Amino acid sequence: MRKQKVSTAVIRRLPRYYRHLNDLYRAGVERISSNALGKSMGLTASQIRQDLSCFGEFGQQGYGYNVESLRSEVSDILGMNRGHTAVVLGAGNLGRALIENFHFERSGVILAAAFDIDRSIVGRELSGVQVYHADQLEEYLSLHPASIGVLTVPGSAAPRIAERLVGAGVRGLWNFTNIELNVKAPGLVVEDVHFADSLLALSYMISEEP
Amino acid sequence: MRKQKVSTAVIRRLPRYYRHLNDLYRAGVERISSNALGKSMGLTASQIRQDLSCFGEFGQQGYGYNVESLRSEVSDILGMNRGHTAVVLGAGNLGRALIENFHFERSGVILAAAFDIDRSIVGRELSGVQVYHADQLEEYLSLHPASIGVLTVPGSAAPRIAERLVGAGVRGLWNFTNIELNVKAPGLVVEDVHFADSLLALSYMISEEP
DNA sequence: TAGATTGTTAATCGATTAACAATC
DNA sequence: TAGATTGTTAATCGATTAACAATC
């Protein structure tokens, strides 16, 4: 295990490793070589060994990697077993889509509660998740700390809510708004999901070809 | 203008350029130097000039870039003025969230129709978008060709629907399912929006720090 | 044991940054 | 004009690939 800083490129590949290893595991595959895994993922064997070597020595010469144990190592590396807890801010269409359809627990994250300001939804329960009024955010978080805030509020409300979340101890913001957040707090991590950027990249790619 | 293949790194930055230029434009800013733009975007001036030079010469020595015209150039490069048309497959929570809240037109994409198999939603109109039965997909597309298919169906339905879309002439798949699509067609582009990968990357990043 | 495959070091490739002549 | 800033070439940095001794 080397203690260099892990590059973003590697970090972005980790979830894919997990996904593929999980598929292999569920398909009953016991062991896999970097060569075979690379082939199925479209990466070189070299890159896979290089990537994994950032975190430890998980393979065995002449054998390869044990699927179950590598999967478990990767899930540890990703923090899936740290009991991260999330709260959703904004139970509109997108917030509800995430609450009702996205399996937070499959990423090892506990979805604890949702917040909104719309009286018609506050007090309800969506797929077992209680919707509180946004006014209660600080009070709730002081009793039930969360590490992740999921921002599905309108863009205009995002900066203020982000500040409040960070003030209440949230360490990561999963930002679905089209706003570029400028909250500065030590150790704070913002992960943007910019739909428009993604669609524009697609638009570029289908526009280029003949 | 050089005719080398543009790297993914550059392509991923283009939508950000557009976003920032659009903000500047709407704020009434007339011109900007690579230096100033870089500062506001967290990039080096050098990188911005290098990136833009992939597509042409848009600046002027001693002056910088005209915000309005650069914004317009970037929107052209991104294919925003090609009249790309999209259809949404699956009008569940996420599909509806996109239909009702995501501004396709701001990316220069016309959202033309949605398809589902649920009798309770087929025939309805969501924010002006008609929902057809999935059986009518081919018929609809033969009359109204579309270049982009937005996949918000359950993962299990994704491969089949993807095949059908491609068969009906769609060139880009905006894939929101957790399935890794293997549709192979010449020139087909798949843009994945993997929520789980994004959340896991966030989980990694908040788990690493002290 | 012999074959397979690792982890790591070295070589290559590509992307970012720096430097600067050209010029508005 | 003089100062500012471009587009591009060269230098640097980092990430990917190749090679190979170590060893299961």
Image (spheres, coloured by chain):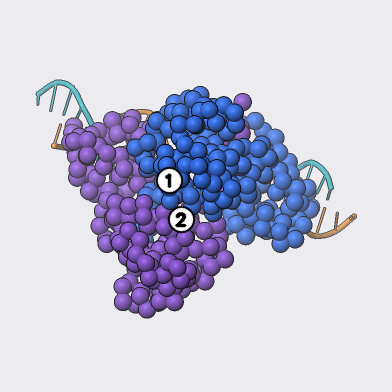
Chain colours: A blue, B purple, C orange, D cyan
Q: Residue at x 51, y 49 (%)?
A: A98
Residue at (41, 54) in percent of width and height: B97
Asked whether the viewer can see residue B210, the reply is: yes
Q: Is residue B93 above or below residue B188?
A: above
Picture quadrant of residue A180: top left
Which numbered disc covers residue A47?
A: none
Q: Which residue is mark 2?
A: B94
Residue identified by numbered label 1: A120
Pinpoint the chain carrying mark 1: A
User: Which secondary structure lies at badge 2?
Assistant: helix
State the residue at coordinates (34%, 37%): A156
- Residue C22: x %, y % from top left: 20, 37
Relative to A13, is A207 on the left or the right?
left
Q: Quadrant of the C terminus of chain B?
A: top right
User: Residue B85: x, y in percent?
Assistant: 32, 64
* Mark 1–mark 2 distance (CA, rounded to whole Å): 20 Å
Residue A7 seen: no
What is the quadrant of residue B168 in the picture? bottom left
Residue A92 percent across, percent down from the top left: 43, 47
Nearer the observer, D1 or B79: B79
x 59%, y 54%: residue: A43
Q: What is the three-letter code of the residue carrying label 1? A: Ser
Whether labels 1 and 2 belong to a single chain: the reply is no
Foreground pick, A37 / B174? B174
